[in-house]
Image (spheres, rainbow, N blue to C red):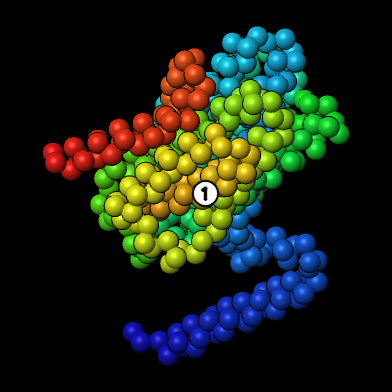
Amino acid sequence: MYNRGAPNRIGAKTLCRVRWRMFLVKNMIDVSKKTSSIMSFIMKVHNYHLVSLKSILQVIPFFSGIGVAIISMYLPLYSYILGASEFVVGIISAVPNITYMFTSFFAGRLSDKLGYRNTFLIGSAIVSLTYIFYAFVPQPILFVPVRALEGIGLSFIWPSLEALAGVDLRNLRTYNLMWGLSLVVAPAIGGTLSQSMKLNIVFVVSSSMMMFCLSLGTLIPKRSQKIFANGEREGDGEKVFTPFLLLCSLFYACTNSIIFTFLPIYSTLKENSISTAGYILTAMNFGRVLAFAIPVNAKKAFGKERALTTLIILSSLLPTFIFFGFWMQLISLFLLGFILGIIYSKTLSNIMIMAGEKRGYYAGLFEFTMGIGSTFGPFFGGIIASLSLYYVFYLPLIICFALVIISVLGQKV
């Protein structure tokens, strides 16, 4: 039977709900007006109004790059002071590169499943703990297993950051620029810290930087995993993945590691000071930062395979000019850093352009290739240096020649 009173009762209940909601909203507004600026900031952070992915990529690569660089520079020296032999020092320096090489590919694949934010947090936590351990270790031989763990942690950090930048080339440019800038300022920061405090305390400072990055990582927007997964692909390079891109990253890593390993030794044999080699390597880092700073549109011409091949050939010739005095070393390695910076940024951007939702997988593959180059470049360089140190600086030219032949044969097949 139709009840005339039902509509009125329903309307009354609805009116009560509306008044109750208005009361809640009004009180919430009153409370928010009385909330301190700190609480307001926290609310905005949790709603991702202030912290964007781009701002995260401006800060985290910079501070994490400084922390990692300081450890790489001063941990071998600290282990030698503790009584490690030259052979053990070499092992301590090589172990993280080896574990990084073998785990970065799997860490990249895992990041696609767990989320780039989560794998970055895991890696930052591991690295922060290992850096704390370095400050209080009693025996240098204990550095070896901990450095292996550090390499695993780093394999979670860098592919995750590269995948977070995605195929948005502006974000990728920001990421490259900040970690490149960190390598320019890290020697000066590390040198200042080592002179003003005990060397093991410097490792605590590095750990604090990584913990700071860990805390910032919690602010990475959770939606960042899919921001660019299906978005517009802004690119001018290859749309299909080719092994040539991995050959470019291999050449970059080999050449970079050879120069940074053997130039200080060459400078010492020429009776130059260590600071002279430092100035030259800083110029090389600065050239790389300038290459990273070039706007995306200005680097379109270097996205094709032919252009990258030309850059590889030019960069392989530049190390041979270091035999002609300080100023020629400074100019040639500045240009080398600039060209290597373009090769690195264009190779990574081309890979990320075609990666789509598998950005972690391809970032891990890219870092795996970088690890191979960073490990075997100094290894083969050491073999050649046992014959003559002068021959080492012709090694990039030999590598370039081999890669060009492999690329040509690959195209024919």
In this rendering, the answer to whether 325 lies above or below 234 is: above
In this rendering, the answer to whether 303 lies above or below 179 is: below
Q: Is residue 247 left or right of residue 253?
A: left
Q: Residue furthest right?
A: 196
Packing grade of label 1 (10 A; few <14, some 14-19, many >=20) is many
For the point 75% across and 41% down, the residue is 189
- The residue pinned by badge 1 equals 335
In this rendering, the answer to whether 376 lies above or below 166 is: above
Of residue 34 and residue 23, the one placed in the foreground of this image is 34
Q: Position of residue 186 (x, y in %)?
A: 68, 41
Q: Quadrant of residue 293?
A: bottom right
Q: Quadrant of residue 384?
A: top left
Q: Position of residue 142 (x, y in %)?
A: 64, 13
* Placement of the C terminus among the 4 image quadrants: top left
Q: Is residue 240 left or right of residue 68?
A: left
For the point 56% across and 16% down, the residue is 91
Of residue 145 and residue 327, the one placed in the foreground of this image is 327
For the point 42% across and 90% down, the residue is 4
Element under disc 1: helix
* Placement of the N terminus among the 4 image quadrants: bottom left
Residue 355 seen = no
Q: Quadrant of residue 129?
A: top right
Q: Position of residue 221 (x, y in %)?
A: 54, 56
Q: Residue furthest front?
A: 324
Q: What amino acid type is highlighted by mark number 1?
A: Leu
Residue 377 seen = yes
In this rendering, the answer to whether 362 lies above or below 401 is: below
Q: Is residue 328 left or right of residue 360?
A: right
For the point 70% across and 72% down, the residue is 28
Of residue 244 and residue 13, the one placed in the foreground of this image is 244
